[in-house]
Amino acid sequence: MKEYATSKLRNLVLLGHGGTGKTSVAEAALFVSGGINRLGRVDDGTTTSDFDPDEVKRKVSINASLIPVEWKDHKINLIDAPGYADFLGDAYSGLAAADAAVIVVCAASGVQVGTELAWDMAADRKMPRAILINRLDRENASFDETLRQAQEVLSKRCVPVHLPIGSEEAFAGVIDLIDRRAYMGDKATEADPPPEMADAIEAARGQLIEVVAENDEDLLNKFLEGEEFSGEEIRKGLLLGIAAGDLVPVFATSAAKMIGIAHWLDSLIEFIPSPVDVKVKAEGAELTADADGPLAAQIFKTTADPYVGKLTYLRVFSGTLKADSHVWNANKGADERVGTLFVVRGKTQEPIQHLVAGDIGAVAKLGETVTGDTLTSKEKPIKMPPLEFPQPIFSVAVFPKSKADTDKMSMALSRIAEEDPILRVHRDPDTGETLLSGLGESHVEIACEKMKRKFAAEIAYQTPRVPYKETITSASSAEYTHKKQTGGHGQYAKVTLNIEPLPRGSGFEFVNKTVGGVVPRHYVPAVENGVHESLLEGIVSHNPVVDIRVSLIDGKEHPVDSSEMSFKLAGSQAFKAGAQKARPVLLEPIVNVRVRTPETYTGDLVSDLNGKRAHVLGITPEERGTVIDAQAPLAEMQRYATDLRSLTQGRATFEMEFDHYAEVPEHVAKKVIEAAEKERTHS
């Protein structure tokens, strides 16, 4: 691949609802530009973007894929990002490397949940946006209806730059409203527009000019005076409006028939800002894409491969990154050796000597560097702001399928979490389970499949155990004498304990209140150890006992037969006897839940939360919907990510965090205790 100056680069991320044809658009762009000589299809698993075995199997994009397209002395770096909710982490990665977002919308399906989500993701970054209405060859495809939805749901600033000629089977080309010319078929053959479209062309062109005029004072004055705009003036206004985010150009294509693709690529070069035009904020500095400036390259994606090793994808924001060089990791404070640099196209890698400011590429086998880190120079260090990713909301407990997988599991989990920064791995101290958390069931399922395929670690998963605890609700006391005679030295210890509840969250206290040495000082720790072991065993459900004070008030030793073990056993049994009399209860974790939803779903969600034993704390209107704050038992919320997606067609989001422990209602506690006893019997 030839070298390109920074001004000749364009970096775009393709976003949108799953199944709108983003991957097909990238494939068509590659084919039209001559990058490939055979057009792949998603259904056949032959596209350049979707090369991962899981993507081929499921026929959906799971990972962001880099597709550089060489077009008319420019390089357009297209980042094909996943559209399904479980895999949005890579969409965030793509946003971090791009200068603009193209939101792909299916002309037959219109604006969908993923369209709105993609719009909001790009809007949060104040990123220039464009709409690509694709699949105009499909049955029931409607450019006008899809445009109306985009203007109504997304922004009134969505304005057509291209109009389709025909629709469904009759879709034959596009009309450029700036020069009033038609571009027909997959070759974009220039022609006169159909005469019957003259009125539609003038109406759409007038709308375009009106929006364009608002981005330049001279153009606005000219518009108000009713003067005709030249093509050059429209282009100037478009460029300004798109860069400022005040105007969203709308294009028309059929990726399957490759109609409109070539002219869309022309428009990307003409109207989407180059890296030179984009100011990027680093920590304490504002960067311009200057190839001769100080080096700043940020990692936006990492992949792990058992054969190639780690492949690190990066965007150079300033300076020039050279192969066979040493750089400084500003986040780790460590030197890194850059070996071979690559331009990546799907799964293929082409070695290059350097990447200039504004370009995107990859480097293999970096030691310390992970996603989000900045590679810079030690003499002039620059650190880019951290990348933002959504928090995981769905957890499973993972465990090796066999003893042979036990050692492999730890390494595989570490590597998969490095590859996907949304995945979290941690051990629950209360249940002892290893938890893997992600954005949904498919997210963690595919992570487990990847670990098998890439690292030969077969890992099973299940719903995590709820970390129940136990406590007591009244005070009691108990005495226990441990006595055993077996010839020679026997065993003897007598203890009396007082047991009382403490406020929630206090933990465990042990107090020695004996006087006169009735229990010698060196045996007191043994009594405490015995009590502590019984705390861990539980009283009613074999869960740890908390918020309790145990006082040793009396006891007795034997000058020959007493020992630490005797007092430990006596302490344990005395506690068990006393705890049973102290009205033990089961405690469950309660979480704070915050749900953001379109207003239309509020009633259904409140009803669903009430059915999950939740306590709704408040309902607050927001600009684009409603916020529901509630507290709910963790036991009822383990699959809430799936439930919420089902109830709201994926339109609602939620956050959840632990708040406190509370007593389990008696009818629920009975079931939990029975299940715990059954599990203990069968284990």
Image (cartoon, rainbow, N blue to C red):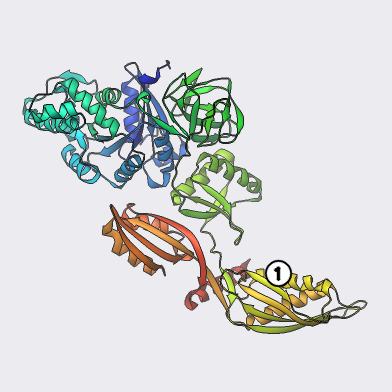
Horizontal side of 544 relative to 353 (left or right) equals right
Which quadrant is home to the C terminus? bottom right
With respect to residue 589, does 109 lie above or below? above
- Residue 451 drawn at (x, y percent): 55, 43
Please state which of residues 139 and 472 is positioned toward the viewer in this rendering: 472
Asked whether residue 237 is in view, the answer is: yes
With respect to residue 659, does 519 lie above or below? below
Residue at image point 28% right, 52% down: 624
Occupied quadrant, residue 356: top left
The number of numbered discs placed on residues in the rendered structure image is: 1
Occupied quadrant, residue 36: top left
Residue at image point 41% right, 42% down: 58
With respect to residue 435, does 142 lie above or below? above
- Residue 314 drawn at (x, y percent): 48, 30
- Residue 317 drawn at (x, y percent): 44, 27
Which quadrant is home to the N terminus? top left
Please state which of residues 241 and 488 is positioned toward the viewer in this rendering: 241
Instruction: Look at mark 1 in the image and give the residue it sits on.
Output: 533
- Residue 9 drawn at (x, y percent): 37, 22
Horizontal side of 44 relative to 427 (left or right) equals left
Please state which of residues 424 and 167 is positioned toward the viewer in this rendering: 424
With respect to residue 631, does 78 lie above or below? above
Name the amino acid, label 1. Answer: Glu
Asked whether residue 18 is in view, the answer is: no
Horizontal side of 564 relative to 331 (left or right) equals right
Q: Secondary structure at mark 1?
A: helix
Residue at image point 66% right, 80% down: 499
Please state which of residues 190 and 14 is positioned toward the viewer in this rendering: 14
Q: Residue furthest right?
A: 488
Occupied quadrant, residue 209: top left
